[in-house]
Image (cartoon, helix red, strand yellow):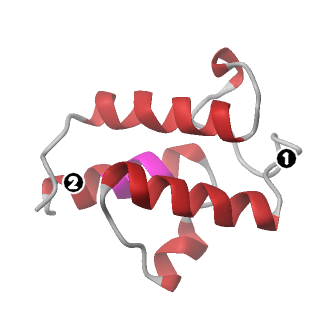
Amino acid sequence: MSEIVSPKSVEDRVYRIVAELFTIPIQNVTLESSPDTIAEWDSVGHLNLVLTLEKEFGVRFSTQQIDQLSNVRKIVGLLTQMNTGN
């Protein structure tokens, strides 16, 4: 069972992952960051992001959920929901 983490903790971890994975300064990551705002966030980058998030948070995304992960806000929201069991 996943440990319950605060939404802010989830947000901080997602920001760090996005910054490291796409090699951008963490200050440039916002809730609105997406493939439209990060050049390196292409289809391969999205797959790598999904795999990294699954490993970091100990979750598995469904195909439908993966399609919904279109920006950092949606990623944080889904991970928060999954980690609180809602």
Question: Which of the 4 image quarters holds residue 11?
Answer: top left
Is 77 included in the stretch rendered in magenta? yes
Q: Picture coordinates of residue 49 (x, y %)?
A: 61, 55
Q: Which residue occupies the foreground of this view, 6 or 31?
A: 6
> In the image, which residues are magenta?
75-79
Q: Which residue occupies the foreground of this view, 77 or 16?
A: 16
Question: Which of the 4 image quarters holds residue 6?
Answer: top left
Question: Which of the 4 image quarters holds residue 70?
Answer: bottom right
For marks 2 and 1, the one nearer the N-term is 1
Spatial separation of the CA atoms under disc 2 and disc 1: 27 Å
The residue shown at (47%, 54%) is 53
Q: Is residue 20 left or right of residue 80?
A: right
Q: Mark 2 — residue?
A: 83
Q: Is residue 36 left or right of residue 3?
A: right
The residue shown at (65%, 59%) is 48
61, above or below 52, in the image: below
The residue shown at (39%, 49%) is 56
Tag 1: residue type? Glu
The residue shown at (25%, 61%) is 82
Q: Picture coordinates of residue 18 (x, y %)?
A: 62, 38
Is 20 included in the stretch rendered in magenta? no
78, above or below 63, in the image: above
> Secondary structure under badge 2?
helix
Q: Mark 1 — residue?
A: 40
User: Badge 1 local density, few (<14 within 10 Å), some, or many (20+)?
Assistant: some
